[in-house]
Image: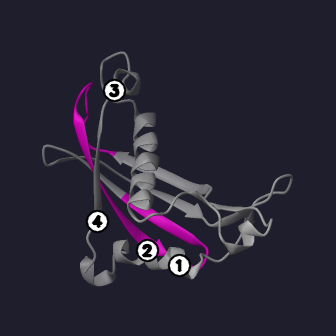
Protein backbone atom coordinates (compact mmCIF):
# COMPACT_ATOMS: atom_id res chain seq x y z
CA UNK A 1 0.00 0.00 0.00
CA UNK A 2 1.38 3.41 -0.96
CA UNK A 3 1.08 6.55 1.12
CA UNK A 4 0.53 9.96 -0.45
CA UNK A 5 3.13 12.68 -0.14
CA UNK A 6 1.73 15.55 1.95
CA UNK A 7 2.58 19.24 1.83
CA UNK A 8 0.86 22.53 2.67
CA UNK A 9 0.58 25.96 1.13
CA UNK A 10 -0.95 29.15 2.46
CA UNK A 11 -3.42 31.00 0.24
CA UNK A 12 -1.77 34.35 -0.44
CA UNK A 13 -3.62 37.54 -1.40
CA UNK A 14 -2.41 37.14 -5.01
CA UNK A 15 -4.05 33.67 -5.11
CA UNK A 16 -7.53 35.16 -4.59
CA UNK A 17 -10.16 36.88 -6.68
CA UNK A 18 -12.02 40.11 -5.88
CA UNK A 19 -14.29 38.20 -3.48
CA UNK A 20 -11.30 36.92 -1.47
CA UNK A 21 -11.81 33.34 -2.68
CA UNK A 22 -8.92 31.26 -4.01
CA UNK A 23 -8.96 31.72 -7.81
CA UNK A 24 -9.31 28.53 -9.84
CA UNK A 25 -5.97 29.15 -11.56
CA UNK A 26 -4.16 29.08 -8.19
CA UNK A 27 -5.05 25.40 -7.79
CA UNK A 28 -2.89 24.63 -10.84
CA UNK A 29 0.07 26.53 -9.35
CA UNK A 30 -0.45 24.69 -6.05
CA UNK A 31 -0.46 21.34 -7.91
CA UNK A 32 2.81 22.20 -9.62
CA UNK A 33 4.38 23.29 -6.33
CA UNK A 34 3.22 20.07 -4.63
CA UNK A 35 4.70 17.99 -7.48
CA UNK A 36 8.01 19.86 -7.06
CA UNK A 37 7.89 19.33 -3.26
CA UNK A 38 7.39 15.57 -3.76
CA UNK A 39 10.30 15.39 -6.23
CA UNK A 40 12.60 17.45 -3.96
CA UNK A 41 11.75 15.17 -1.03
CA UNK A 42 13.29 12.35 -3.10
CA UNK A 43 16.36 14.29 -4.24
CA UNK A 44 14.81 14.85 -7.68
CA UNK A 45 13.71 17.86 -9.74
CA UNK A 46 11.73 18.62 -12.89
CA UNK A 47 15.01 19.70 -14.50
CA UNK A 48 17.93 17.32 -13.97
CA UNK A 49 21.18 16.20 -15.47
CA UNK A 50 21.82 12.52 -16.09
CA UNK A 51 24.81 10.74 -17.63
CA UNK A 52 23.67 11.70 -21.15
CA UNK A 53 23.29 15.34 -20.12
CA UNK A 54 26.74 15.38 -18.55
CA UNK A 55 28.20 14.43 -21.94
CA UNK A 56 26.42 17.32 -23.69
CA UNK A 57 23.09 15.61 -24.36
CA UNK A 58 20.78 18.20 -22.86
CA UNK A 59 18.79 17.93 -19.64
CA UNK A 60 15.85 15.83 -18.50
CA UNK A 61 12.68 17.79 -17.91
CA UNK A 62 8.97 17.08 -17.45
CA UNK A 63 6.64 19.19 -19.62
CA UNK A 64 2.96 18.89 -18.69
CA UNK A 65 0.67 17.40 -21.31
CA UNK A 66 -2.58 17.31 -19.32
CA UNK A 67 -4.03 19.08 -16.28
CA UNK A 68 -7.46 19.25 -14.73
CA UNK A 69 -9.01 20.20 -11.41
CA UNK A 70 -12.50 19.73 -9.96
CA UNK A 71 -13.50 22.22 -7.27
CA UNK A 72 -15.70 21.35 -4.27
CA UNK A 73 -15.65 24.22 -1.74
CA UNK A 74 -13.81 27.55 -1.67
CA UNK A 75 -10.60 28.42 0.15
CA UNK A 76 -9.92 31.98 1.29
CA UNK A 77 -7.01 34.33 1.86
CA UNK A 78 -4.62 33.03 4.58
CA UNK A 79 -6.16 29.52 4.69
CA UNK A 80 -3.52 26.80 4.92
CA UNK A 81 -4.35 24.19 2.29
CA UNK A 82 -3.24 20.60 2.79
CA UNK A 83 -2.22 18.86 -0.43
CA UNK A 84 -1.85 15.10 -0.84
CA UNK A 85 0.03 13.88 -3.91
CA UNK A 86 -0.04 10.33 -5.30
CA UNK A 87 0.92 8.88 -8.66
CA UNK A 88 -2.06 7.29 -10.39
CA UNK A 89 -0.02 6.05 -13.37
CA UNK A 90 3.69 5.60 -13.94
CA UNK A 91 4.15 4.75 -17.60
CA UNK A 92 7.27 4.17 -19.67
CA UNK A 93 7.67 7.89 -20.44
CA UNK A 94 5.04 9.68 -18.33
CA UNK A 95 3.72 10.11 -14.81
CA UNK A 96 0.20 11.12 -13.81
CA UNK A 97 0.04 12.83 -10.42
CA UNK A 98 -3.24 13.04 -8.54
CA UNK A 99 -3.87 15.75 -5.97
CA UNK A 100 -6.33 16.06 -3.10
CA UNK A 101 -6.74 19.51 -1.56
CA UNK A 102 -8.18 19.78 1.95
CA UNK A 103 -8.84 22.45 4.55
CA UNK A 104 -9.35 21.28 8.12
CA UNK A 105 -10.22 17.82 6.81
CA UNK A 106 -12.78 19.04 4.25
CA UNK A 107 -12.08 18.30 0.59
CA UNK A 108 -11.56 21.51 -1.40
CA UNK A 109 -10.66 20.05 -4.78
CA UNK A 110 -9.12 17.12 -6.63
CA UNK A 111 -6.87 17.38 -9.65
CA UNK A 112 -4.41 15.64 -11.90
CA UNK A 113 -1.34 16.56 -13.92
CA UNK A 114 0.36 14.31 -16.46
CA UNK A 115 4.00 15.04 -17.23
CA UNK A 116 6.24 13.43 -19.87
CA UNK A 117 9.94 12.75 -19.34
CA UNK A 118 11.78 14.60 -22.10
CA UNK A 119 15.31 15.28 -23.22
CA UNK A 120 15.73 19.05 -23.64
CA UNK A 121 18.52 20.14 -26.00
CA UNK A 122 18.93 23.84 -26.82
CA UNK A 123 17.54 24.70 -30.25
CA UNK A 124 15.64 21.42 -30.59
CA UNK A 125 12.06 20.45 -29.69
CA UNK A 126 11.64 18.30 -26.56
CA UNK A 127 12.11 14.58 -27.23
CA UNK A 128 10.18 12.15 -25.03
CA UNK A 129 12.40 9.48 -23.46
CA UNK A 130 11.95 6.53 -21.13
CA UNK A 131 11.94 7.47 -17.45
CA UNK A 132 15.40 6.50 -16.15
CA UNK A 133 15.35 3.55 -13.74
CA UNK A 134 16.98 5.61 -10.95
CA UNK A 135 14.22 8.25 -11.27
CA UNK A 136 11.43 5.66 -11.52
CA UNK A 137 12.65 3.86 -8.37
CA UNK A 138 12.16 7.05 -6.33
CA UNK A 139 8.60 7.57 -7.66
CA UNK A 140 7.40 3.98 -7.10
CA UNK A 141 6.52 4.40 -3.38
CA UNK A 142 3.92 7.02 -4.38
CA UNK A 143 2.17 4.94 -7.06
CA UNK A 144 -1.40 4.08 -6.07
CA UNK A 145 -2.16 0.46 -6.88
CA UNK A 146 -5.65 -0.92 -7.59
CA UNK A 147 -5.50 -2.52 -4.13
CA UNK A 148 -5.11 0.93 -2.53
CA UNK A 149 -8.60 1.78 -3.78
Going by the picture, which residue comes out furthest to the top? 18
Circle 4 is placed at which residue position?
4
Q: CA distance from mark 3 to mark 2?
A: 31 Å
Q: Which mark is residue 22?
A: none
> Which residue carries the number 1 mark?
134
Please name which of the two marks, 1 or 4, marks the residue nearer to the observer. 1
Q: Earlier in the sequence, mark 3 or mark 4?
A: 4
Closer to the N terminus: mark 1 or mark 4? 4
Magenta-colored span? 71-98
- Report the residue marked by disc 3: 12
> Residue 139, how many percent across, how many down?
43, 72
Res. 120 image quadrant: bottom right
Question: Residue 73 in magenta?
Answer: yes
**Coloring scheme used:** one colour
Residue occupied by mark 2: 138
Q: Nearer the viewer, mark 4 or mark 2?
A: 2
Residue 39 painted magenta: no
Q: What's the residue at 45%, 43% (across, down)?
A: 28
Image marks 2 and 1: residues in contact by CB distance under 8 Å: yes
Instruction: Assess whether mark 2 and mark 4 are in contact (beta carbons under 8 angstroms).
Output: no
Callout 4 secondary element: loop
Horizontally, is 96 left or right of 131 in the view?
A: left
Amino acid sequence: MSLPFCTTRRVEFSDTDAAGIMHFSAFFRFMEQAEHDLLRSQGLSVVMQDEVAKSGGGKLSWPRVHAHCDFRIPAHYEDVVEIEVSISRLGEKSASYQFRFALAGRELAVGEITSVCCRMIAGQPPQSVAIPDWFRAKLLPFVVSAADG
